[in-house]
Amino acid sequence: MKIVAAACQIEETVKKSRFIGVINPCRSEAEALAILTDLHLRYPDASHIVYAYRVQSADGLVCRFYDAGEPSGTAGKPIFQHLEGKQLINLVVAVVRYFGGIKLGAGGLTRAYGNVAKAVIEAADIVDYVEFAEVDLTLDYSRLQPLEYQLKKLDGSILAQEFSDNVRLTVKLPKHNLPSLNAFLA
């Protein structure tokens, strides 16, 4: 799976209609909805603000798309299909449309929204998604320095540490490196 590193925007004109493609990273459905609310405030006079998002949550993948008054299946779904096809998560893609006076028809709308979504995704900086895990550990003082060295090799870090009879730590590292950490601790 992949994520977008930063927000990006493009603009296209199709038969006098102005389309603005916007892509934003987000970490939750609430954040996705806040981004959409902001778009409605930035473009209050837009004819349509169509969107799709895919967000990884504790309950699994949350996927939504919305046609915003366009004929059913001609706007949100083509955007969503690009997100799904490229296995993108934790992002919102919205297309803002200003109607130019020429009707595009169902096929024209589907192509226009799909092409703008594809263009904004191609313009964005897409990176691999790395899922992290947090692990609580308790160890002897003598094992702290070797653990710190091991964490550097595993792209991990210490989030919190508490010193008493032993050292209690909370560490964060990519989930795919957990077996290596467990082997080191065994």
Image (cartoon, rainbow, N blue to C red):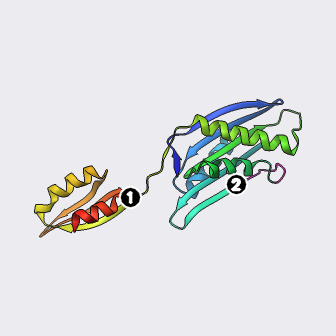
Pick the residue in front: 166 or 73.
73
- The kind of residue tagged 2 is Phe
69 left or right of 142? right
| Segment colored magenta | 66-72
At which x and y percent is residue 53? 63, 52
Does label 2 or label 1 sit earlier along the sequence? 2
Of circles 2 and 1, which is in front? 1
- Which residue is at 59% across, 34% downward? 123
- Which residue is at 37% across, 61% downward? 133
169 left or right of 7? left
Q: Is residue 59 visible?
A: yes
Of the numbered discs in the image, which one, if any, rests on residue 176? 1
- Which residue is at 57% across, 56% downward? 55
Pick the residue in front: 80 or 19.
80
In the rendered image, the vertical position of residue 14 relative to residue 85, given as above or below = above
Of the numbered discs in the image, which one, if any, rests on residue 65? 2
Residue 98 falls inside the magenta stretch: no
- Which residue is at 20% across, 63% downward? 162
Q: Is residue 47 visible?
A: no
In the rendered image, the vertical position of residue 172 relative to residue 8, given as above or below = below
The local secondary structure at tag 2 comes to strand
- The kind of residue tagged 1 is His
Q: How many marks?
A: 2
Which quadrant of the figure has residue 18?
top right
